[in-house]
């Protein structure tokens, strides 16, 4: 009888661990991006890189630092409806945030974030612009 | 029997704890994995983007903004900058090198280093692959060829100069006729000067604007250091001038021409490696 109880306890433990591992494997497969999921995110990163480059070379980033971020907001607003972006500019010398702008109707960032960066200089000061993108739920 | 039960419970607890730690690490690595996939998926763009990014920043610091265009028989080059500046550009560019290798590289996940020694020695050079070169220093802005006894083959210079001072005297070029057409648009607190002349690429032709007995701007077109068709805009001793130049250059060679700063970048990210000068336009 004691032997049977021992076997039951062992089986119970093995089953518990097995079930846990299966649950975690399933959850991991949802969390880990596969090739099909990465493709649209790569497109999003490509869009961010293009937008940042354009915003630097047209002077929109520099203008936003003067307090007028209308031109930058226009770029974010022109992106696809299903995409959300936030733009943050950090001043290198002080590591302080100089600007934060979010695309209208996007709220707080969620899900898989896609980042792109662009360095630019204004009045002999260096700044780093960071765009974070995500898909609307 | 109790000790055996305890043993099983301990083993199960340990297995659960290890599984949870492993799972947490897996989830945390998702963003890193995705970043790697996106870099791997855009290898050419990622490297080219970084070089363009750094090049734009150097352009901003120097104000040179070197541009190239081309038609069947000519290259048009545009460039500029400020001479007689009241700031230490070499120091600013050196600080930028630290920023790029440390801060920028950390945020972008790249591994990069910049050799800016040729930009922090007091003169900034933008070179063209056909041997032409623009050199900007605090004393002068010079467009020349690096070939000894060489010719720039420039047929036309359009020169804009802005100085925020009152002029004492202007001594213009003596029109001599020649193979280079020069259009000068000069402005300072006295107003604007526009002068269009033809000058010889082998002559020595100077336009001098004095601001005080010691302070002046000299614009030279022609022979310089054994080279011909050279443009030199120099200041002495303490005149700040904003300069912009468009140069039309005879060029019928089929070879591509490219501009690049004398700054070298080692870049690697996600298996992508590139070692090259900071390039500009390619025509």
Image (cartoon, rainbow, N blue to C red):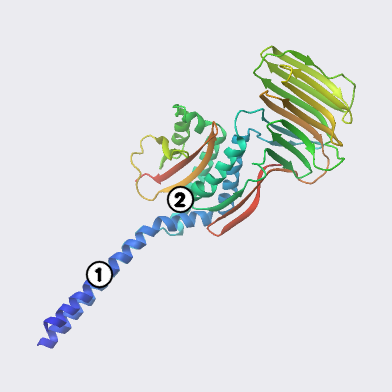
Q: Residue at x 39, y 46 (%)?
A: A135
- Vertical position of residue A121 compared to residue B49: above or below: above
Q: Which quadrant of the rendered structure holds the C terminus of chain B?
A: top right
Do the residues indicated by labels 2 and 1 lie within the same chain of the protein? Answer: no
Can you give x and y, in whole percent of width and height, for residue A42 in the image? 49, 51
Considering the numbered disc 1 on the image, is that residue within a helix, a strand or a loop?
helix
- Vertical position of residue B70 compared to residue B43: above or below: above
Label 2: chain? A
Q: B206 left or right of A40?
A: right
Label 1: chain? B
Q: Which mark is residue A41?
A: 2
| Callout 1 crowding tier (Cα within 10 Å): few <14, some 14–19, many ≥20 | some
> In this figure, what is the number of numbered marks?
2
2 or 1: mark nearer the eye: 1
Can you give x and y, in whole percent of width and height, for residue B101 in the image? 54, 49
Residue extending furthest front? B213
Can you give x and y, in whole percent of width and height, for residue A100 in the image? 40, 36
Q: B160 left or right of B44?
A: right
Residue extending furthest left? A1
Q: Quadrant of residue B125?
A: top right
Q: Which quadrant of the rendered structure holds the N terminus of chain B?
A: bottom left
Q: Which mark is residue A87?
A: none
Q: Residue at x 70, y 32 (%)?
A: B79
Q: B65 left or right of B29?
A: right
Q: Residue at x 87, y 19 (%)?
A: B175
Can you give x and y, in whole percent of width and height, for residue B244 in the image? 70, 27
In the foreground, B40 or A38:
B40
* Residue that carries the numbered disc 1 in the rendered image: B16
Considering the numbered disc 2 on the image, is that residue within a helix, a strand or a loop?
helix
Confirm whether residue B283 shows in the render. Answer: no
Q: Distance of mark 2 from mark 1, alpha carbons?
A: 34 Å
Confirm whether residue A134 shows in the render. Answer: yes
């Amino acid at each position: 009888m004691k032997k049977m109880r021992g076997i039951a306890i062992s089986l119970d433990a093995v089953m518990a661990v097995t079930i846990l591992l299966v649950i975690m494997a399933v959850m991991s497969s949802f969390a880990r991006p596969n090739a099909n999921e990465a493709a649209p995110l790569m497109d999003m990163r490509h869009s961010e890189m293009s937008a940042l480059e354009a915003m630097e070379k047209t002077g929109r980033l520099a203008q936003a630092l003067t307090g007028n971020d209308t031109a930058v907001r226009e770029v974010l607003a022109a992106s696809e409806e299903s995409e959300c972006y936030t733009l943050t500019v950090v001043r290198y010398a002080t590591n302080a945030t100089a600007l934060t702008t979010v695309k209208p109707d996007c709220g707080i960032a969620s899900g898989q974030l896609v980042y792109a960066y662009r360095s630019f200089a204004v009045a002999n000061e260096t700044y780093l612009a960071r765009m974070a993108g995500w898909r609307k739920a | 029997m109790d000790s055996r039960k305890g043993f099983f419970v301990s083993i199960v607890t340990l297995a659960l704890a290890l599984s949870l730690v492993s799972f947490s690490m897996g989830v945390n690595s998702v963003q890193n994995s995705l970043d790697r996939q996106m870099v791997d998926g855009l290898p050419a763009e990622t490297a080219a983007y970084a070089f363009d990014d750094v090049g734009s920043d150097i352009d901003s610091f120097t104000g040179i903004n070197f541009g190239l265009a081309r038609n069947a028989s000519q290259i048009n080059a545009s460039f500029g900058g400020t001479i007689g500046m009241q700031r230490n550009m070499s120091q600013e560019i050196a600080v930028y090198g630290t920023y790029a290798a440390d801060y920028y590289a950390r945020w972008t996940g790249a591994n990069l280093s910049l050799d800016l020694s040729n930009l922090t020695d007091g003169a900034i050079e933008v070179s063209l692959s056909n041997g032409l070169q623009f050199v900007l220093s605090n004393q002068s802005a010079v467009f020349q060829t690096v070939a000894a006894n060489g010719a720039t083959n420039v047929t036309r210079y359009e020169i804009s100069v802005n100085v925020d001072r009152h002029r004492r005297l202007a001594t213009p070029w003596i029109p001599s006729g020649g193979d280079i057409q020069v259009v000068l648009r000069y402005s300072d607190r006295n107003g604007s000067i526009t002068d269009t002349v033809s000058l010889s690429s082998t002559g020595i032709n100077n336009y001098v604007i004095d601001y005080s007995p010691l302070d002046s701007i000299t614009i030279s077109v022609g022979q310089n250091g054994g080279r011909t068709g050279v443009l030199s805009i120099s200041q002495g001793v303490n005149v700040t001038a904003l300069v912009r130049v468009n140069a039309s250059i005879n060029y019928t060679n089929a070879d591509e021409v490219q501009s690049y700063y004398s700054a070298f970048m080692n870049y690697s990210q996600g298996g992508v490696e590139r070692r090259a000068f900071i390039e500009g336009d390619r025509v």
